[in-house]
Image: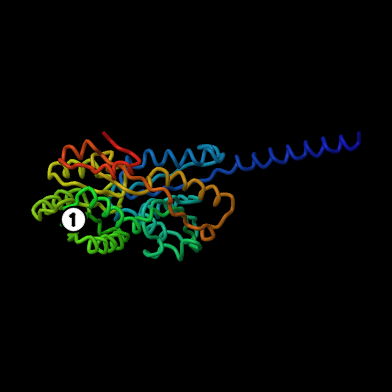
Amino acid sequence: MRFIGLVVVLAVDLAFAVLAAQAAQTGNIYRIGFLGPGAERIYTDSLLRLRTGLRERGYAEGKQIVFEYRFADDRYERLPGLAAELVRVKVDLIVVHSTPGTRAAKRATGTIPIVMVNVADPVGTGLIASLAHPGGNITGVSNIDVGLAAKRLELLKEVLPKLSLLGVLRNPNNASGEPQLRETQAAARSLGIEIRSFDVRDRTELDTAFSLMANARTDAFMVLGDPLFLSKQKQIANLATTKRLPSVFARNENVEAGGLMSYGPTFAEQFREAATYVDKILKGAKPGDLPVEEPTRMYLVINLKTAKALGVTIPQSVLLRADQVIE
């Protein structure tokens, strides 16, 4: 009987210890900053995935966590000031989208943990030391865009066998654009395709770029990964239809908006994965010790409605590999 009594006492003590730990966690409200270079509307679904991921790990908004949101609305020159604001309000951690955003956050603080999301080449652009051991205060999720540009071009060539001149839209304000362009150029040489790049820094330059591509008689165009091109997805789709230019993108959202095809990881899923990093860091892990994750699942998305409007026939061999077909 004494043994049973001791077991009961220990069990009660353990239960109280667990409750005390939960109460302590509840009393500690973490302030999470989010820095987005793009327009607020492009993050609606992605931030929902981030919040859902945190909720599944026991963080209730208003009780364990609160968010501080900052959006640059495609004006990348605003990023340093917005990052500094998050530091001033003393956030415990910053979640940040893309290379330009992560650069601004890194310059703003060397101590507050940073979880980057959807960054193309974090090692090549100097954001971290290595994927396995990022070091410093930054970790997160890479989108490996620099490793996918060649694959996107190969897919476009399958759809357009006579492709000989390709326009490439890039934002020169994004450091990851240059390595993406170099990889595209290397792939183009092996496929016998000529490349012409067009710089786009804002909405007005999109109109100019499409006029220049049409005048140059490009057969199609590729859009390199950048928040600006997500924010302007409808404008890009409309211009492509007007100029009758087939397209390939890094993000499926561009295809859902009317682009022809895309290949790569999904934007929203990467934000959900970021919740894992946030959880680990809030529980005491050091960002520099957490390996940066690269996506292993790629999605091919094709818009058949757009293909029909452009008079493009998608080969059955490509359709069979598609993860999503929009009709």
Number of numbered tags placed on the structure image: 1
Q: Is residue 242 left or right of residue 129?
A: left
Is residue 170 or residue 195 the one in the foreground?
A: 195
Picture quadrant of residue 189: bottom left
Residue 70, position as x, y percentages in the image: 37, 47
Q: In the rendered view of the protein, which quadrant contains the N terminus?
A: top right
Looking at this view, name the residue that lies furthest to the right. Answer: 1
Q: Is residue 37 above or below residue 308?
A: below
Residue 263, position as x, y percentages in the image: 32, 48
Q: Residue at x 31, y 61 (%)?
A: 175
Is residue 167 or residue 164 the one in the foreground?
A: 164
Is residue 24 or residue 125 the one in the foreground?
A: 125
Looking at this view, name the residue that lies furthest to the front. Answer: 317
Q: How is the image coloured?
A: rainbow
Question: What secondary structure is found at the residue carrying circle 1?
Answer: strand
Q: Residue at x 18, y 42 (%)?
A: 312
Query: To which residue does mark 1 refer?
Result: 166
Mark 1, other Cα within 10 Å: few <14 / some 14–19 / many ≥20: many
Q: Is residue 37 left or right of residue 20?
A: left
Q: Is residue 175 left or right of residue 140?
A: left
Task: Tell me which amino acid carries mark 1.
Answer: Leu
Q: Residue at x 20, y 45 (%)?
A: 236
Residue 166, position as x, y percentages in the image: 18, 55
Q: In the rendered view of the protein, which quadrant contains the C terminus?
A: top left
